[in-house]
Amino acid sequence: MSKHHHRLPLLAAVTLLLSLRLSATDHPPTTTPITRFQNYLRINTAHPNPDYNTAVTYLSSFARTIPTLQIQTLYFTTPDKPLLLITWPGSNPSLPSVLLNSHLDSVPAESLKWFHDPFEAHLSPDDGKIYARGAQDDKCVGMQYLEAIKELEINFHYSPTRTVHISYVPEEEVGGFDGMAKFVKSVEFKKLNVGFVLDEGQASTTDEFRTFYADRSPWHVVIKATGVPGHGSRMYDNSAMENMMKSIEVITKFRENQFDLVKAGLAATSEVISANPVFLKAGIPSPTGFVMNMQPSEVEAGFDIRQPPTADPDLMRKRIAEEWAPAWRNMTYEITEKGPLRDFMGRPLMTATDGSNPWWSIFKQAVEAAGGKLAKPEILTSTTDARFMRQIGIPTLGFSPMKNTPILLHDHNEFLKDSVYLEGIKNSVLLKQRSVHLKSFDEDSNLLGAKFSGLLWTCYLVYQNFSCNMQISYCKNITRIAGDGF
Ligand SMILES: *[C@@H]1O[C@H](CO)[C@@H](O)[C@H](O)[C@H]1NC(C)=O
Ligand SMILES: *[C@@H]1O[C@H](CO)[C@@H](O)[C@H](O)[C@H]1NC(C)=O
Ligand SMILES: CC(=O)N[C@H]1CO[C@H](CO)[C@@H](O)[C@@H]1O
Ligand SMILES: [Zn+2]
């Protein structure tokens, strides 16, 4: 660790020098994985005006430095919402492919509340923290995919058996409807024959990587009560306000019961149904606020409901209709389902994380064989684009390799340490020097009982935080098995 601390200020200084020289001489600067990551972070793709085209141009130009990659830009809505699709062709294109997904956009940032401008990608010389909106969510994985492939291509001359696609989609942070939702329904997507997807996950504060096999599905529920209006001094039954208050009591009780399970340690937050009130609309406006001596005839309340895939959506609909907004209490409701809870076959929207899913086994093997530890797979408390892939039946895991890192997505001062992003610049060089030959990797991985070798090896590089010590010990095993010497 301490070595990094000394090396990084130097790296930053060198980068600065190089960029100063660039402006003077117009020579292209030498980039490193860290500066390339910073440059991606500097492109402001935050809502409400994400600059997708600059991001796509930037990623494409980096992808072009890897000769075998095929690059396409797809448009499903307007020209300002491109989707970048990069393909690393496999030697056996008939096998289902692997899709590595990330989103181009990020949530906005309140610059004034940050230590550093959220679009400067400031690398703190003391601790290597790179401050930027999108550092964790999820520009890190987007660049790591490409860096890993570059490493494999250039340093190992490795080409995968299975075709690997990398997608950069717009609009995830605003629901994915003009991004992944349209992509998965397209002819272009069908042609990819995707067998497995890795999408974004979340940072882990411990030494174990976190994996997500399901999202909670959001519903926006608005309930409305009507009743006879009346003077503020009158006492009568069934006013709109009274009817609404009865509902709010019921919903509060429901919320408490769910939250009690979490507080008692019986369930994770992501395993229960959350029902949070988000707005209340009532009263008759006056020039100074509200009319105080009138009981209104209409009241409205909004709730953000999140259900895990284990929840029964029909039961929830029944609960809302009968208990939360019963017609007999003069109430109506509207449910906006922001995502499915069941896949196209009617199965709960989750990816198996046991022996029944060969992709899970290979993923786990890859992480563990390389010395990484996986925490118990989790349901994500929020929602990602993964739900669209799971909905059409494609196994999808959420995984962002950030250990020992505070969870700062959507927060002020979102950062990722350079060492976490890329531990082992120096180890890559070591690897190069050793020039490991992996010519028969597919046979080797069969020897290891792994059929999905393309993925296995990609997982290695993408998900081992580039720690090549681990890769080397794995390579040793491979070459030993293959009798290749090392
Ligand atoms: C519902 O509205 C009707 C018609 O205004 C009224 O007669 C009835 O008392 C109301 N019932 C409740 C429970 O609010
Ligand atoms: C290498 O192989 C040995 C014996 O087959 C095994 O126990 C070990 O876990 C392997 N190490 C890695 C990094 O794959
Ligand atoms: C940030 C992070 O997870 N770094 C780890 C990368 O892998 C090496 C193992 O060689 C660990 O020591 C680091 O902690
Ligand atoms: Zn994200």
Image: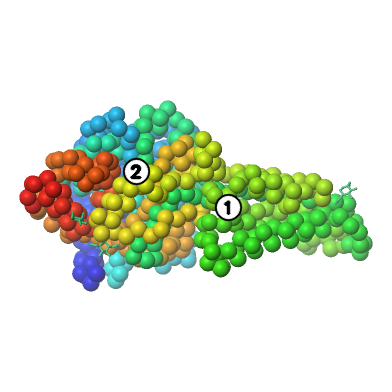
**10 Å neighbourhood of mark 1: few (<14), some, or many (≥20)?**
many
Residue at numbered disc 2: 358
Q: Position of residue 302 (x, y in %)?
A: 68, 53
Q: Is residue 36 above or below residue 1?
A: above
Query: Type of residue at label 2?
Result: Pro
| Picture residue at 32% right of the left edge, 36% below the top | 97
**10 Å neighbourhood of mark 2: few (<14), some, or many (≥20)?**
some
Could you tell me which quadrant the N terminus lies in? Answer: bottom left
| Picture residue at 20% right of the left edge, 66% below the top | 7
Q: Position of residue 114 (x, y in %)?
A: 44, 65
View extreme (left): residue? 485
Q: Nearer the viewer, residue 362 or 71?
A: 362
The answer, for residue 64, to whether it is visible in the render is no
Q: How is the image coloured?
A: rainbow
Measure how far apart labels 2 and 1 are at the Cα level: 29 Å
Question: Dividing the image into four equal quarters, which quarter contains ligand 2?
Answer: bottom left
| Picture residue at 29% right of the left edge, 51% below the top | 365
Residue at numbered disc 1: 306
Query: Type of residue at label 1?
Result: Arg
| Picture residue at 43% right of the left edge, 62% below the top | 408
Query: Mark 2–mark 1 contact, CB under 8 Å?
Result: no
Viewed as shown, does residue 462 lie left or right of 296?
left
Secondary structure beneath disc 2? helix
